[in-house]
Image (tube, helix red, strand yellow):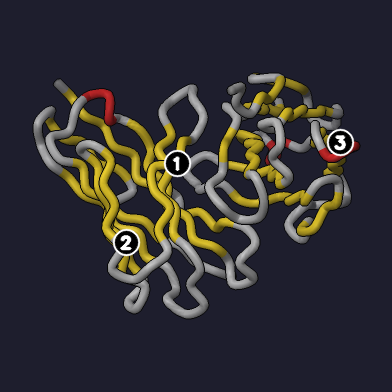
Amino acid sequence: ILNVEQSPQSLHVQEGDSTNFTCSFPSSNFYALHWYRWETAKSPKALFVMTLNGDEKKKGRISATLNTKEGYSYLYIKGSQPEDSATYLCASLNQAGTALIFGKGTTLSVSS
Amino acid sequence: EAGVVQSPRYKIIEKKQPVAFWCNPISGHNTLYWYLQNLGQGPELLIRYENEEAVDDSQLPKDRFSAERLKGVDSTLKIQPAELGDSAVYLCASSPSGPGELFFGEGSRLTVL
């Protein structure tokens, strides 16, 4: 069974702070790594889908990196805003490459 | 384009009662997933459909859970009878084909009393 770990479990930052989260996954038989943002009372939305070692993707103030050899991905948020408050989930394809296995998520709270 | 639609959004039942959840995926999406999300945990796959075929139901507790996707479009997930431990959010997701980006519904939150 693929084990995806995320840290920290939760964090609270002030508006304007930059922050980052970690997702670790088994590096063997890697297929792809996904990041999703899940706001309260809404549906999870994809942020990034990453496949290649060394991938770096950016969407506005949010960016992510991928290291498939050591089995980790970082999600960065620059200048956090209250609307960034959400649970951030990462997920990796299982060894059969057919379904995503999710971590428990990192819950971010940004206060103004 | 309409997103993934789930109903009901919230359901409260007493234990041993049946409950059903419905999902309408994005038009044209062949792959449909049901995930279970317990409080403090990440979503866990219950079942995956490719069109009308259940290709991965290894994590579905078949003694009380059942699912169907007739005609390869809408899907229904049923629990009978419900137990206290079934209280959770049931998420439906779809993707165009195979394990690409998932498009999620808002989930159905079940509370079993």
- In the rendered image, residue A65, in percent from the top left (x then y), is placed at 27, 59
Query: Foreground residue, B59 or A84?
Result: A84
Helix, strand or loop for disc 2: strand
- Residue A73: image tag: 2
Image point (83%, 35%), residue name = B78
Q: Which of B77 and B75 is in front in this view?
A: B75
Foreground disc of the pair 1, 3? 1
Tell if the residue under mark 2 belongs to the same chain as the one under mark 3: no
Relative vertical location of residue A87 with respect to residue A39 in this rendering, above or below: below
Disc 1: which residue? A46
The residue lying toward the viewer, choosing from A107 and A28, is A28
x then y, percent, for residue B47: 74, 50
**Is A92 rendered above or below residue B52?**
below
Disc 1 to disc 2, how far (Cα)? 15 Å
Q: Mark 3 points at which residue?
A: B81
- Among numbered discs 1 and 2, the one appearing first in the sequence: 1
* Amino acid carrying mark 3 in the image: Pro
Give the class, few, some or many, for how many residues have Cα within 10 Å of label 2's Cα (few <14, many ≥20): many
Tell me the element at label 1: strand
Question: Which residue is painted at 43% across and 34% down in the image?
Answer: A38
Asked if the residue under mark 2 is in contact with the one under mark 1, i.e. CB atoms within 8 Å, the reply is no
Would you call the spot at circle 1 few (<14 residues within 10 Å), some (14-19), or many (20 or more)?
A: some
- Numbered circles on residues, count: 3
Tell me the quadrant of the picture where the N terminus of chain B can be found: top right
Looking at the rendered structure, the kind of residue marked 2 is: Ser
The residue lying furthest to the left in this view is A16
